[in-house]
Image (spheres, coloured by chain):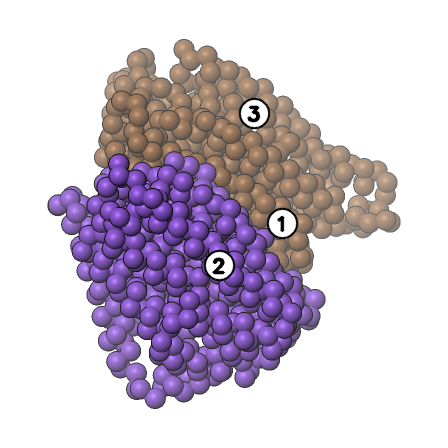
Amino acid sequence: MTGTDFLALSPIIALAVGASVLLLQIAFLRNLKLTTGITVVTFLACLFFLFYITKLNHQTTPLLLVDPLSTFFSIVFVLCACITTFISYEYLKNRPGRNDEFFLLVVLATMGSIVLTYATHLASFILGLELMGIALYGLIAYPHQDDMSLEAAIKYLVLSGASSAALLFGFALLYAITGSLFFPDLLSGLASPEVAVGPQSPFWARQLILLGSALILAGISFKLSLAPFHMWTPDVYEGSPAPITGFLATISKGAVFAATLRLYVIGEFHNFPTIVTGLTILSIISILVGNLLALRQENIKRLLAYSSIAHFGYLLIALIAAGTLTPNGISAIEPSAYYLAGYIFTTLIATGLIAAISSSNNEENANLSDIAGLFWKNPLLALCLSVSLLSLAGIPLTAGFIGKLYIFQMGVEAGAWLLLSILIIGSGIGIYYYLRLIFSMTTDPSSSRSTLAPALPVTVSLITLTILVLYLGIYPQPLMEYLLWNT
Amino acid sequence: MELLNLLIILFIGGAAAWVGEHFSKGLSRWISLLFIAVAAVSLLEMLSNIPAPTFLKDPITKDPTTWLIHGRADWIPRFGISFELALDGLSLLLVVLTLFLGAVSVIASWDEIDKHQGFFQANIMWTLTGVIGVFIALDLILFFLFWEVMLVPMYLLIAIWGHEDKAKAAMKFFIFTQVSGLLMLLAMITLAIFVKDANGYWSFSYFDLLDNNLTSSLATFIMLGFFIGFTVKLPGFPFHTWLPDAHTQAPTAGSVILAGILLKTGAYGLIRFTVPLFPEASIAFAPIAILLGASGVVYGAILAFGQTDFKRLVAYSSVSHMGFVLLGVFAWNALAIQGAVMQLVAHGLSTAALFMIAGALQHRLHTRDLQKMGGLWQSMPRMGALAMFFIAASLGLPGMGNFIAEFLVLAGLFQVYPWLAVVSSAGLITGAIYSLKLIQESFQGAPDDTLTPPDFSALAMSAMIAMLIGLIVLGIFPQLVLDISQPVINALTSEITL
């Protein structure tokens, strides 16, 4: 290990140290405020190291590759984790019982997401995935007196475990064909003459690739909750504590997508027509199913779950179109990274607000009626949520629009007219339920619900996120250049 | 980039109006009026810097330096998207109309809106910002931005302050425009990508995209994307179904803005983008567009006659009148386009006035049902006389702007499609029928002594008189307006012949 190796790993080390300190602190002195403080300091330290290594491009052991792109993703994730901490404190401070370990699990899950983002090896891929997944089981089940939350945790445990198993078996088959778990070697292994995909390649190789890619696709689709592997999403989102719903919808999904993106691009999987066809089908079904099922939801968490299914359907279009645009598929990175960042900030506003509402109501769920009259009770937060919803709907001046612009551009250049028409239909349906939320914020406050007045850190975080979403929508050039230069 | 000031003034005006509510109830209305006035002064100031002969000289469409005002700054160089604003005679007319009707809509909402007055005024101002942006943006993505962004405050205007069925109407309005807008965005990006492949660099600038050598089949598809986007907003038959709901449910100021200026953005888009960007495809498509226009004229008139709701009747009459715009644009000769432009201004004024009367009636009687009205002239002679005047204008009585407009369109259309001109002129007759029905059932007839609503206030009268004078001036000295748009239309029709 050289100094550069340590520097490259410094964000992960910071989180590991933070987690250890938290363990010790909780063992000796239980104090929620102190725990929150240490967690925030840990995340800030991690962010500091991440900003320090933005220019670094370094392969640290075959397991992890630290490059500007994944550092960018990590910054997004850690920032969101930090905001999740503020929101969680608000959520936990009035709960009975001992809540300190919650933050330990948040730190561990965030660490998993960074490992996943930096992974260039199937082993580190699985390692990051499981580190994140196992911490999340605990987080989802944290209100362990609540039936809904237990149901969600068990559902997530069983299905996530099964999908990890499918993923592992798929990886094993890849290993059987290529003899390697290292992403770049996968490419050369698959391209080698005895496996090379095509009519001349041996029968066994083609069958194994087919089976392996099907298993991997299914496993990843589970984690990204792409239809038809989406069934768990609404139930788990509904049952989880509200801050964790946000974590699941943003960091957890984002990290899996970032890792998949890297696997897809480095392994040049766009050369396999079966995989591209599979992604196309997943994308179409996800867009339609996500949008159609979101239409009649009264529960905002479930609505956001379905909307996230649809959004990952849109995101897949960038992967599908990439192969047609550039031979090495590298053009997938810029659009999907932009889209993902915009989506994560946008969704975190919505979930953060729901968490604030459910903490002030002492209820796990927020329904449409809970945000009635928000525009008149708390105009600032209503404005934040409106920006978030408009961004999800892809209205200009928000990050969501630039993301959609990218997807349109990719689709047109690749001539993917079917996907584009599905995208237009999906967005048209999507408008309905996003506007329904905005409309219900403008109605007269009917019930005498307590006024929503979250603590200052939460309000500031939500406003910061809103400004970020608007900034990415109004002045996208800097990030575009950053992503373009670093791919 | 002085044009940017116009947008900034209106946008800040909206924010100031929202904040102003907290200081004194009713202050936000004055703030809105003040900022509209400031915007108008800054527009005048910009115009005064332009030498007078420039207004009369034909511009060259592809050369932005020959336009009245032009400014450009990089915005997203990654995709060649720039912040490009420009003004020519056509946009100038529509910007002036927007500012004028903006002030009218503030006055129309003076006493009507009680709750959340500040936010209401903010939404009006932001809608105006978006509409003016549409009229001056010459970068396609920037144009699209304003096109979409103006929907949000308009949606809120309908959804918050609308009448009984507001949620559905607002939703319908937004989804129709948004989906057709996405088709348009797809068309814009496809166009830009093909021009990029030819030129080697990204650009969404109108002036770069005019020189596209698209193959005819591709051009047809892209043109259709633009056409549908604009025709939904116009609204042209058969995409008009959102309009009666949105107009009927909107608060008065919303209806005034919708009918007076929002519909005009569709027409503007057709003249500015659809035909100049895709001349050949438009030639091929013209017969269908004209058929749609003629159907709109007749169909809108027939439906208008069947309505018993004051606002719905006026809304369907808009479908009929805007059909003339479609006819004028796709007949594509100087006469017909002049007619279409004139129709935009004249219809803007007359319909805005009618919606203001409808709003005033609803505010006083709590109904829009014509069958519950009758003899209102007795108690409200001023409103009655004004209603008579604007209904006469709207049905195309000579001496008022609408007559000039429809006459020019029909005269121009007759040169290319004589038979369709004959069919469309039926719109003038049916127009008279439904318009007279409207005045008869509301203001004339036996008076109901139980109804003694108050007449128009002085402030409302001043807005009405301003529109009245406007229509008479348009009718008697149409050359004033024609002279402003003539150079643009000369340039367009000489460069592109259908």
- What type is the residue that disc 3 sits on? Trp
Q: Mark 3 points at which residue?
A: A232
Q: Are marks 1 and 3 on the same chain?
A: yes
Q: Which residue is drawn at 86% across and 49% down?
A: A199
- What type is the residue that disc 1 sits on? Ser
Q: Name the residue under label 1.
A: A421
In the rendered image, residue A108, in percent from the top left (x then y), is placed at 43, 29
Q: Do the residues labelled 2 and 3 touch (CB within 8 Å)?
A: no
- Whether residue B127 is visible: no
Which of labels 1 and 3 is toward the front? 1
* Label 3 packing within 10 angstroms: few (<14), some (14-19), many (20+): some
- Left or right? Give the position of A63 relative to B283: left
Q: Which of B27 and A475 is in front in this view?
A: B27
Q: Mark 2 points at which residue?
A: B431
Q: Which residue is drawn at 36% across and 86% down?
A: B54
> Image quadrant for the N terminus of chain B?
bottom left
Secondary structure of the residue carrying numbered label 3: helix
Secondary structure of the residue carrying numbered label 1: helix
- Left or right? Give the position of A396 relative to A277: left
- Closer to the chain start, of discs 1 and 3, is 3
Which of labels 2 and 1 is toward the front? 2
- What type is the residue that disc 2 sits on? Gly
* Tint of chain A: brown
- Residue B371 sits above or below residue B301 on the image: above
